[in-house]
Structures are given as structure tokens and as C-alpha cells.
Amino acid sequence: MSSVAAAPRALVRKPALSSPLRDAWNRYRRNRAALVGGVIVAVILLMAIFAPVLEPGGYEFTNLAETLKGPSAAHWLGTDEVGRDLLSRVIWGARTSMTVGFLVPLLSTLIGLPMGAAAGWFGGKTDFVVQRLLEAMAALPTLLVAILLATLYGSGLLNVALYLAITGWVPIARLTRAQFIALREREFVTAARAIGTPPWRIMLQHILPNAAGPIIVVFVLAIPGAVFGEAGLSFLGLGVQDPIPSWGKMITEDAQYMQLDPLIGLIPMLCIALTMLGFSFLGDGLRDALDPSSRE
């Protein structure tokens, strides 16, 4: 009797364990655009990380005897106006774009997160001062400020990231402030206060983890803007300088030769477009996955 009774119970499947992370992943993978964006981002990141391994030839190596050559077995995408391998420069350009793309949101978060948290938690005069500062910084056009600073203090990879982050922290600060205002009166915060938990511990251990989802989404969505900003500055000659390859600088240098070889200008344009599209899809998918109420 016991073996007969045990058989049906063995066929009953246990329900899958549910967790916030698992639920978020299930929502994310149902978004096909987000999956496509994730694949594009993964490919670009792999190109950036393994650029020294993937490049078929040195990105600095010039050969004036092979200028503006079309695709061949030696140069899969051809060569530029001074005989440099175009594929190698595109791969290293991915590293430049991803360095700036992640560094700008990181610096923006380091600036905006503490300011937004202080304004949302303490309120009063602190909130008033931060709000006025946010309004003043939001009135400044990011790219024009970066152009002005690059003209005054010089260009370069780190300088470009810093210039773009000077005004790029405003969205992070605003979102963090809104999240802290919404969460500071919740029951778990009230309970933590009642047992004498210090304010800094409440902010770090209770409020910040609950506000992390929207902040991560804003971080990811800021990456394509930083990539486009770096490309714009490099296009104007105020961004990354030689010998470091940059997609924006490649467009500037190769635009006058596009009638002879359209690929040298179209390929970096396509790389910028795919990067912005991939991170935009990824950010939208993360927003829907981490904050389902945002779709309503």
C-alpha cells in the first residue's frame, strides 16, 4: 500500500522557487527586443574586452602602399586613408566607446547618488539647496558644456568622461531623491528607526537596496548618451586624440574619402547606431523587468 500511495506523490512536480531576481529574469526574457539588445551589448563588450586578441593587425600600423584598399583576405574591412587596418580600428574603437560609456554614468552616479539621497532623506533646507542646484545644472546643455571645457582645459579620454559627467549626474540625483522620499516613510524604515538604527545605516542597508532597480536602469540608459557624446566631441576634434581609435574620430577623418570607399565612414556610423540601439533596448527591458509598474 505504501509503494502504491507513494507513486502518485512522486509524479507531482514541485513548484519552482520564486524570488525577485528570478521573476525579473522571467519578465526580461519575454521581451524579445530586450534580448536582442542584450546580444548586441554582449558582442560589443566582448570586442572591447578582448580587443588585443581579436584585432587582426595593429591599429597604429600604417602602410602607405595600401591606402583605401577594399575588403580582402589581409584586411577584412579594408584600410583607411593611411593604410591602417579598418577592422582593428573598429574593434579598438569599441573599447574607447565602452570605457567612456561606463565611466561617465559611474562618475555621474558617484556625484548624483549622495546628493539625491541627502535631499530625499533629510528634506527641508538640504532638499531646497539640492533642488535649486539641480535646476541650475539641468539648464546647461551637456554637449555644449563639454565642448567649452574641452576647449579650455584640453581633450583626452579621461577628460571627455569627466566633462560629460559634470552635467550628467542630474537624472541620477533626481531619481535617487524621488526614491528616498517614497521609501523613507515605509514600514520597514519606521521599524528600523524605532529600534534605534542610525540614519546612515537605514539609508545604506534598507532604502538604497530597494531603490537600486530604477537606479540601475537609469545607469544603463545613460551609457548610449555617453557614447554619443564622446563620438560627437571626437567628431569635432575635441575628444579622444591619436593614437587611440574612436568611432567618432574615424568618421571625421574618413568622411572626405567616403566617395572612394564608403565603408570607412559607414562602418563606424553603424557601430555607434548599434551601440545606442542595443543599450536602449537593454535599458527598456531592465526597466520593465525590475519595475513592472512602469509599464502600466
Image (cartoon, rainbow, N blue to C red):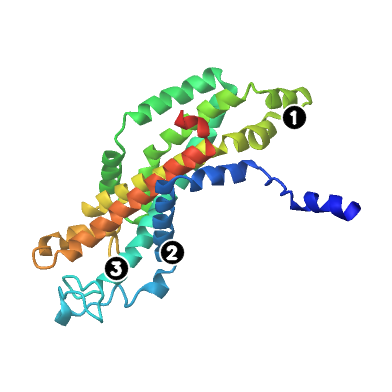
SS at badge 3: helix
Query: Badge 2, how many Cα within 10 Å: few under 14, some, many 20+?
Result: some
Residue depicted at 36% across the width and 47% down the height: 224
Q: Which residue was labeled with disc 2? A: 46
Mark 2 or mark 1, which is nearer the start of the sequence?
2
User: Is 97 in front, or is 283?
Assistant: 283
Q: Is residue 250 above or below residue 24?
A: below
Residue depicted at 24% across the width and 56% down the height: 269
Q: Nearer the viewer, mark 1 or mark 2?
A: 2
**Amino acid type, residue under disc 2 in the picture:** Leu
State if disc 2 and disc 1 touch (CB < 8 Å).
Answer: no
Q: Position of residue 195 (x, y in %)?
A: 79, 26
Mark 1 or mark 3, which is nearer the start of the sequence?
3
**Amino acid type, residue under disc 3 in the picture:** Arg
Q: Residue 89, which numbered label?
A: 3
SS at badge 1: loop
Query: Badge 3, how many Cα within 10 Å: few under 14, some, many 20+?
Result: many
SS at badge 2: helix
Q: Position of residue 18 (x, y in %)?
A: 66, 43
Q: CA distance from mark 1 to mark 2?
A: 44 Å
Residue depicted at 45% across the width and 23% down the height: 131
Residue at the extreme left of the image, as rendered = 259
Q: Which residue was labeled with disc 1? A: 197
Q: Where is residue 41, by image quadrant?
A: bottom left
User: Is 128 in front, or is 1?
Assistant: 1
Query: Badge 1, how many Cα within 10 Å: few under 14, some, many 20+?
Result: few
